[in-house]
Image (cartoon, rainbow, N blue to C red):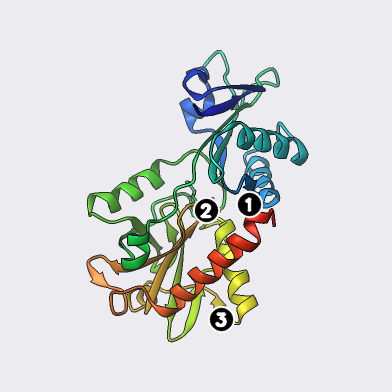
């Protein structure tokens, strides 16, 4: 049984209820986080809680909980669910009013807080061995992609674009520059240099993005954080997608063309090893 949290109550997920008048349902008016949990320790919980606070502030939605309260609720959800490695989903919406109105409701309407957890599913050995395919598309999202909001229609359409083409992810370009994936950050390797676009309003500030750059720095992998041209992506030696659940996953074909020699490359293999080492020694110990 999966235990969920709705507005102060821990309930079986199958019994969790919110109103159809909830603004998350009517308008996609909410924020979310996905937090990986290793050996029952939520990874970079402070960073996830801070990113949530940042999204809520930009949405002009008063944060219903302080950081310590959030950490206690997340800890309780982790403890009440059966898996050692989990993926905790957390969502805050602007709540349920009695009428439908785009403008914000009054202070009597309180935010809806929902959490659930799922087993953490990371890429299979086969996916890691062969890499995955990606399609590309124009980034049709809005200009606040730095916010982790539940208004996800564009991301859903873009991910489905990949699925329809038998691919795992869609790589997004805006004005001939790389932004990110439909639900991941995208790294590029070219001539021995790891490239990734800088954080901006055009991409989600990924927690895994930070980890990968920290590992590159710590181990001395040459890297540049700068705008990356679509042409550089299309002529890359390696492409990787990264996220809390995908970790570091090689993309070995883009729009039906092989990336590099069509096999996972040495820089990605190296980063994967560093990431797993970090996971076993730091993440599993609450670092
Ligand atoms: N998505 N970019 C987008 C658009 C994302 O949706 C995600 C994660 C990332 C990677 O962020 P992080 O490294 O913090 O997981 C980048 C989550 C996993 C999701 O929506 O399920």
Q: What kind of element bears circle 1?
A: loop
Q: Is residue 162 above or below residue 119?
A: below
Quick one: label 3 or label 2, which is nearer the N terminus?
3
Q: What kind of element bears circle 2?
A: loop
Name the spot of residue 283 as percent of width and height, x first. 63, 57
Question: Distance from label 3 to label 1 (Cα)?
Answer: 23 Å
Say whether residue 34 is left or right of residue 240. right
Mark 2 and mark 1 in contact (Cβ < 8 Å)? yes
Q: Which residue is mark 1?
A: 43
Say whether residue 200 is left or right of residue 177. right
Q: Is residue 78 above or below residue 182?
A: above
Which is more toward the observer, 260 or 126? 126
Q: Is residue 8 above or below residue 200?
A: above
Circle 3 residues within 10 Å: few <14, some 14–19, many ≥20? some
Circle 2 residues within 10 Å: few <14, some 14–19, many ≥20? some
Considering the image in quadrants, where does the C terminus appear? bottom right
Name the spot of residue 215 as percent of width and height, x first. 60, 71
User: Is there any visible trace of residue 210 in the rendered image?
Assistant: no
Residue closest to the far bottom? 191
Quick one: label 3 or label 1, which is nearer the N terminus?
1
The residue carrying mark 2 has its beta carbon less than 8 Å from ligand 1: yes
> Residue 221, which numbered label?
3
Question: Distance from label 3 to label 2 (Cα)?
Answer: 21 Å
Who's the residue at 54% across and 43% down the image?
86
Q: What kind of element bears circle 3?
A: loop
Name the spot of residue 46 as percent of width and height, x first. 71, 49
Question: Distance from label 1 to label 2 (Cα)?
Answer: 9 Å
Who's the residue at 51% across and 72% down the image?
271
Front tag of 3 and 1: 1
Q: Which residue is mark 2?
A: 244
């Amino acid at each position: 049984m999966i235990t969920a949290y709705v507005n102060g109550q821990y309930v079986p997920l199958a019994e969790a209820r919110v109103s159809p008048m909830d603004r998350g349902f009517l308008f996609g008016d909410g924020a979310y986080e996905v937090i990986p949990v290793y050996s029952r320790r939520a990874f970079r919980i402070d960073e996830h809680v801070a990113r949530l606070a940042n999204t809520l502030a930009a949405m002009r939605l008063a944060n219903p909980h302080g950081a310590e309260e959030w950490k206690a609720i997340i800890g309780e959800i982790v403890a009440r669910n059966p898996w050692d490695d989990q993926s905790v989903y957390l969502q805050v919406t602007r709540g349920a009013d009695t009428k439908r109105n785009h403008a914000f409701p009054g202070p009597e309407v309180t935010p809806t807080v929902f959490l659930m957890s799922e087993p953490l599913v990371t890429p299979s050995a086969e996916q890691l061995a062969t890499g995955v395919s990606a399609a590309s598309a124009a980034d049709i999202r809005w200009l606040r992609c730095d916010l982790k909001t539940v208004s996800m229609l564009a991301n859903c359409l873009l991910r489905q674009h990949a699925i329809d083409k038998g691919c795992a992810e869609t790589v997004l370009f805006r004005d001939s520059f790389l932004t990110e994936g439909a639900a991941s950050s995208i790294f590029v390797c070219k001539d021995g240099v790891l490239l990734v676009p800088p954080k901006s309003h055009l991409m989600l500030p990924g927690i895994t993005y930070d980890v990968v750059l920290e590992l590159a720095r710590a181990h001395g992998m040459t890297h540049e954080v700068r705008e990356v041209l679509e042409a550089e992506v299309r002529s890359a030696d390696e492409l990787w997608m990264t996220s809390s659940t995908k970790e570091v996953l090689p993309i070995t074909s883009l729009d039906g063309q092989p990336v590099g020699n069509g096999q996972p490359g040495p820089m990605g293999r190296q980063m994967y090893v560093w990431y797993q080492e970090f996971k076993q020694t730091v993440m599993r110990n609450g670092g």
